[in-house]
């Protein structure tokens, strides 16, 4: 009995954990962002996909456990886009967000940034974010390459402009003490990245607003394309991109400002960068699952709030859409 409670009966396309609660979503997304899935071989991926196909068609070999099926689905969800069925490029998967993004976060939080270094790190950060946003978007409608490039240029420009502008203002604030100025300079990346992240999501997924996204009934059948659902999907994703950098860009500067005063680190300055890197990695690793767990990936919306033609196309009171990640 304890074993079945720990591993529920497998349901294709459903989560192993309750998506109606924050804790359930947190446990689900901890699975999705598990960095170990980056090392899944091509043969293991094919085996997992075949296992799920066999389950779907009722041809599952005897002896396959629910745990094996959940693990196969975890691998598929971590690697394969739910709308396109294509593999997501490794650095742009959610499981690759922390490993590939942490070096950029460390660069953004380095003290004594020049205008040039600020521009370079903000460009790298928003380039990575743009690719992650695009790779994990709702892809029920095709997005032209020109739209991607427009969104990319807009996101990078906004991030660099905000960051450089804030840095220049701080450098001109003569009334601040050097110590206060140092702490504020370290906190500059947060408002710059948070506001740029909103622009990034909006610009990279702008096509969804004009084309709409597919909404599904309780049987998984597409009942229409909704621009209103697209607005909800983008707003929810943008909110998570504001929450995500909050602890990442606020906690490490505060923690490091205290650690740097320790006598041990004063006499061992070479340890500052490794410790700084570790603090950033831990904070990033904890922040990501919390932020993306705020809303379910497969979100629901009442039909009465959508376009009239969708309400006429289904008897369902609630429909589902892929929010994206």
Image: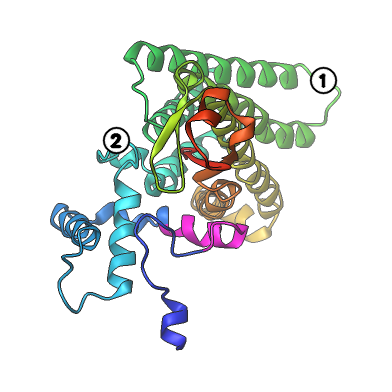
Q: Nearer the viewer, residue 298 or 201?
A: 298
User: Quadrant where the N terminus lies?
Assistant: bottom left
* Residue 113 seen in the figure: no
Give the quadrant of residue 306: top right
In the picture shown, does residue 164 fall above or below 63? above
Q: Are marks 2 and 1 in contact (CB under 8 Å)?
A: no
Which residue does the numbered mark 1 point to in the structure image? 174
- Residue 69 drawn at (x, y percent): 29, 66
Q: Work out which residue is located at the far bottom of the displayed protein and give it.
A: 1
Which residue does the numbered mark 2 point to in the structure image? 84
Q: Residues within 10 Å of mark 2 (few under 14, many from 20)?
A: few
- Residue 35 drawn at (x, y percent): 37, 55
Task: Left or right? Give the position of 243 relative to 49.
Answer: right
Point out the stretch of residues depicted in magenta. 18-31
- Residue 25 drawn at (x, y percent): 54, 57
Residue in view at x 77 percent, y 37 percent: 179
In the picture shown, does residue 178 fall above or below 252? above
Q: Residues within 10 Å of mark 1 (few under 14, many from 20)?
A: few
Q: Nearer the viewer, residue 155 or 324?
A: 324
Residue in view at x 50 percent, y 19 percent: 203
Sequence-first tag of 2 and 1: 2
Secondary element under disc 2, as helix, strand or loop, is loop
Is residue 278 shown in magenta?
no
Residue in view at x 34 percent, y 42 percent: 82
Q: Nearer the viewer, residue 202 or 249?
A: 202
């Amino acid at each position: 009995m304890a074993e079945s409670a720990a591993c529920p009966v497998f349901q294709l396309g459903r989560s192993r954990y309750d998506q109606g609660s924050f804790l359930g979503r947190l446990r689900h997304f901890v699975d999705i962002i598990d960095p170990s899935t980056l090392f899944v071989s091509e043969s293991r991926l094919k085996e997992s996909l075949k296992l799920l196909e066999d389950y779907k068609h009722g041809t599952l070999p005897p002896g396959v456990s629910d745990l094996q099926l959940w693990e196969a689905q975890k691998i598929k969800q971590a690697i394969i886009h739910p709308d396109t069925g294509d593999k997501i490029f490794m650095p742009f998967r959610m499981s690759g967000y922390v490993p590939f993004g942490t070096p950029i976060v460390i660069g953004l939080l380095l003290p004594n940034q020049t205008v040039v270094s600020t521009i370079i790190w903000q460009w790298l950060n928003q380039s990575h974010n743009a690719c992650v946003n695009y790779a994990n978007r709702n892809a029920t409608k095709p997005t032209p390459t020109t739209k991607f490039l427009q969104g990319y240029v807009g996101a990078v420009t906004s991030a660099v402009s905000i960051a450089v502008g804030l840095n220049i203002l701080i450098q001109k604030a003569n009334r601040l003490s050097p110590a206060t100025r140092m702490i504020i300079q370290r906190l500059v990346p947060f408002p710059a990245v948070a506001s740029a992240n909103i622009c990034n999501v909006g610009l990279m997924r702008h096509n969804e607003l004009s084309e709409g996204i597919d909404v599904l009934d309780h049987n998984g059948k597409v009942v229409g394309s909704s621009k209103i659902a697209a607005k909800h999907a983008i707003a929810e994703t943008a909110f998570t991109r504001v929450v995500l950098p909050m602890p990442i860009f606020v906690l490490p500067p505060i923690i490091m400002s205290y650690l740097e005063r320790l006598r041990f680190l004063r006499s061992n300055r070479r340890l500052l960068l490794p410790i700084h890197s570790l603090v950033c990695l831990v904070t990033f690793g904890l922040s990501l699952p919390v932020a993306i767990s705020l809303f379910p990936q497969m979100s629901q919306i009442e039909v009465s709030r959508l376009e009239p033609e969708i309400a006429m196309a289904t008897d369902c009171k609630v429909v589902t859409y892929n929010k994206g990640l």
